[in-house]
Image (spheres, rainbow, N blue to C red):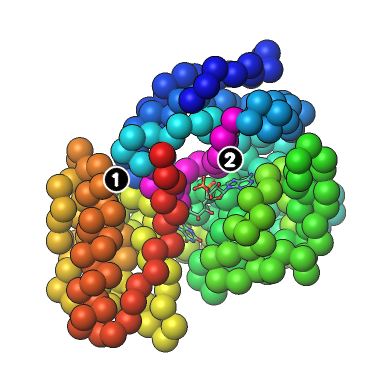
């Protein structure tokens, strides 16, 4: 990547291993990684990258990503430092780097219901809106009112209807615009009941998911009328390994890094699973995890 100028007062690391920053713990170095803490510094970074023709990628907690083993030949902008939250009666405005689990916990404490499903999802508000994250029969689309985003260097507001929400998808997957913040509408309820629902979801995650190993959540999208994990298990693929990557013994819908896995190991295992499940059931699984090319 060419040399470039980065605004002062923004933490920037050169040649930063991406395996340190993603939940799968794989991937080579980013030419540069920036960690802005405010919306103006994020905006300034994006403006600088655009002006200097620097390739960049906005990343939240990197819990749904597979970085290339060669790394990323550009600038990765991590949003985890943008944690502003504003509560106003039944609505909350959260900056893109806010943890959705932390937001759900605070909503419960305030007696506001609607985010219980998100308690335990390890991503940020930006990643959750981009992906339309969901669980236990609910999703971000059920609570989102609007989002602010950057197009070029200008800030726009997008209302609910313009988000084109679909299963694990929003308009942002097409536009690639930077989500700055989102507004959610919640419903008053009994704090202890809300907390109990959230905790129930967390326990069920701990019981069913291989949280003891690095992973990126469900590797495949849910196919119509079936569960990816069940299809993979029925195909006899639990425990199947390529290098350090393994189809989890605990939940076949997860691929875990058993130590020393590369992204290439994971991609080869994904292809092996897709081919085998397709041969046995006629269903072609589509990856949910997003591959980030070098
Ligand atoms: C243990 C585990 C459990 C999980 N459980 C669930 C679950 O129950 N339901 C579910 O839906 N997902 C689940 N996931 C997957 C993941 O947590 C979600 O997809 C989450 O929403 C991703 O958020 P993130 O901040 O990590 O996004 P990232 O992985 O960092 O990014 C995902 C995509 O969003 C884009 N993006 C991120 N922030 C912005 C922004 N501010 N502006 C524009 N684009 C942005 C990135 O460029 C990337 O394309 C799980 C993952 C793990 C590891």
Circle 1 is placed at which residue position? 263
Q: Horizontally, is 242 left or right of 291 in the view?
A: left
Establish if 157 lies above or below 282. above
Quick one: label 2 or label 1, which is nearer the N terminus?
2
- Answer whether residue 244 is magenta in the image: no
Tell me the number on the disc at residue 214.
none
Report the residue at 23% width, 72% height from top.
275
**x and y percentages locating residue 24 in the rendered image:** 34, 44
Name the foreground residue: 7 vs 109.
Answer: 7
**x and y percentages locating residue 249 in the rendered image:** 19, 61
The answer, for residue 185, to whether it is visible in the render is: no
| Residue range of the region highlighted in magenta in the rendering | 54-67
Circle 2 is placed at which residue position? 58
Report the residue at 66% width, 55% height from top.
175
Report the residue at 82% width, 40% height from top.
154
In terms of image quadrants, where is residue 254? bottom left
Within 8 Å of ligand 1, the CB of disc 2?
yes
**x and y percentages locating residue 170 in the rendered image:** 63, 63
In terms of image quadrants, where is residue 205? bottom left
The answer, for residue 12, to whether it is visible in the render is: yes
Report the residue at 50% width, 41% height from top.
61
Q: How many marks?
A: 2
- Answer whether residue 66 is magenta in the image: yes
Name the foreground residue: 204 vs 247.
Answer: 247
For the C terminus, the image quarter is top left
């Amino acid at each position: 990547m060419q040399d470039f100028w980065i605004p002062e007062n923004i933490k920037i690391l050169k040649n930063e291993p991406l395996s340190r920053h993603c939940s799968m713990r794989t991937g080579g170095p980013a030419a540069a990684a920036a960690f802005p803490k405010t919306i103006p510094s994020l905006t300034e970074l994006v403006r600088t990258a655009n002006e200097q023709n620097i390739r960049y990628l906005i990343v939240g907690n990197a819990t749904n990503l597979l970085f290339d083993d060669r790394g990323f030949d550009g600038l990765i902008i991590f949003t985890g430092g943008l944690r502003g939250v504003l509560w106003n009666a039944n609505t909350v405005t959260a900056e893109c780097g806010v943890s959705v689990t932390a937001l759900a916990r605070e909503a419960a404490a305030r007696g506001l219901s609607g985010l219980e499903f998100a308690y335990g999802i390890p991503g940020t508000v930006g990643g959750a809106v981009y992906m339309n994250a969901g669980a236990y029969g609910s999703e971000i689309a059920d609570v989102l009112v609007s989002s602010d985003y950057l197009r070029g260097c200008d800030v726009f507001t997008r209302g609910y209807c313009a988000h084109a929400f679909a299963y694990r998808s929003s308009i942002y997957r097409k536009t690639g615009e930077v989500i700055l913040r989102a507004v959610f509408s919640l419903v008053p309820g009994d704090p202890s009941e809300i907390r109990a629902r959230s905790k129930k979801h967390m326990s069920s995650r701990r019981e069913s998911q291989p949280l003891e190993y690095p992973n990126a959540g469900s590797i495949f999208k849910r196919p119509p009328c079936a569960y990816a994990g069940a299809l993979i298990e029925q195909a006899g693929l639990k425990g199947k390994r390529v290098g350090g990557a393994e189809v989890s013994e605990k939940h076949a819908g997860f691929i875990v890094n058993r130590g020393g896995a590369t992204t290439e190991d994971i991609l080869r295992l994904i292809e092996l699973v897709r081919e085998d499940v397709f041969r046995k059931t006629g269903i072609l699984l589509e990856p949910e995890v997003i591959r980030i090319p070098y």
